[in-house]
Each structure stands twice: as C-alpha cells, then as structure tokens.
Image (cartoon, rainbow, N blue to C red):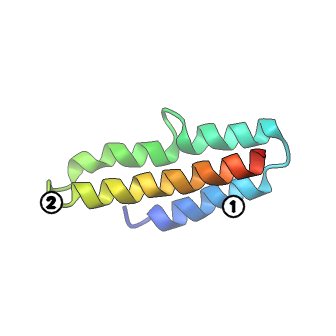
Amino acid sequence: MEALPALTRAALDEVAASSSLAALDEVRVRWLGKKGTLTEQLKSLGSLTAAERPAAGARINEAKGQVQAAIDARRA
C-alpha cells in the first residue's frame, strides 16, 4: 500500500508516453486489466485489518480512477 503513489505516478507516466492507441491499450491492460498492477493491489486488502480496508480500498480506487481518466483524456 505504501507504494501506491509511486505506482500511480509510473502508470500516469506510461500513459503520457504512449504514442499510439495500441500502446495506450497495452498500458491500460498492464495497470487496470484483470491481472493489472493496480487491480492486484485490491487483492492485497485481505491482509489488512477490517478497520484499514475501507480507507485503503478508497485510495486504490482513486488511483485507478486517476489512471483511467488519464487514459481517456489521452485517447481523446
């Protein structure tokens, strides 16, 4: 969880560096796909206490939203 800001920054950097729609789609799958890096972070919530899970889940979902918004903006 402590690496989430760094992961988000890396994902946003890859979105910005994508030069084609195919490259952009590869970035989307790598970060947001079923086995994507940010999606895998959600699976780690089970190791947290019940009190920590809601806040951690919200941070992960916020990061995923930022990356998705950047992908949508880049695609447009």
The residue depicted at 38 percent of the width and 67 percent of the height is 2
User: Which secondary structure, mark 1?
Assistant: helix
Q: Nearer the viewer, mark 1 or mark 2?
A: 2
Circle 1 residue: 13
Quadrant of image for the N terminus: bottom left
Give the labeled residue for mark 2: 51
Name the spot of residue 6 as percent of width and height, x first: 53, 66
What count of labels does the image hold?
A: 2
What SS does tag 2 mark? loop
Residue 22 placement: quadrant: top right
- Of 29 and 66, the residue lying toward us: 66
**Disc 1 to disc 2: CB gap under 8 Å:** no
Q: Quick check: 29 above or below 72?
A: above
Residue 8 lies, with reference to residue 43, above or below; the image says below
What residue is rendered at 84% in x and 42% in y? 20
The label number, if any, that marks residue 52 in the structure image:
none
Tell me the kind of residue under disc 1. Asp
Q: Earlier in the sequence, mark 1 or mark 2?
A: 1
The residue nearer to you, when weighing 69 against 2, is 69
C-alpha distance separating marks 1 and 2: 32 Å
Q: Callout 2: few (<14), some (14-19), or many (20+) C-alpha neighbours within 10 Å?
A: few
Going 67% across and 44% down the picture, which residue do you hit?
27
What percent of the width, then of the height, locates residue 3?
44, 64
Q: Amino acid at mark 2?
A: Ala
Report the side of 53 relative to 19 (left or right). Answer: left
Residue at the extreme top: 34
CA neighbours of label 1 inside 10 A, class few (<14), some (14 to 19), many (20+): few
At 39% from the left and 60% from the top, the residue drawn is 59
Residue 57 position in % (x across, y down): 32, 53
From the viewer's perspective, is residue 47 above or below residue 26?
Answer: below
Q: Is residue 24 left or right of residue 47?
A: right
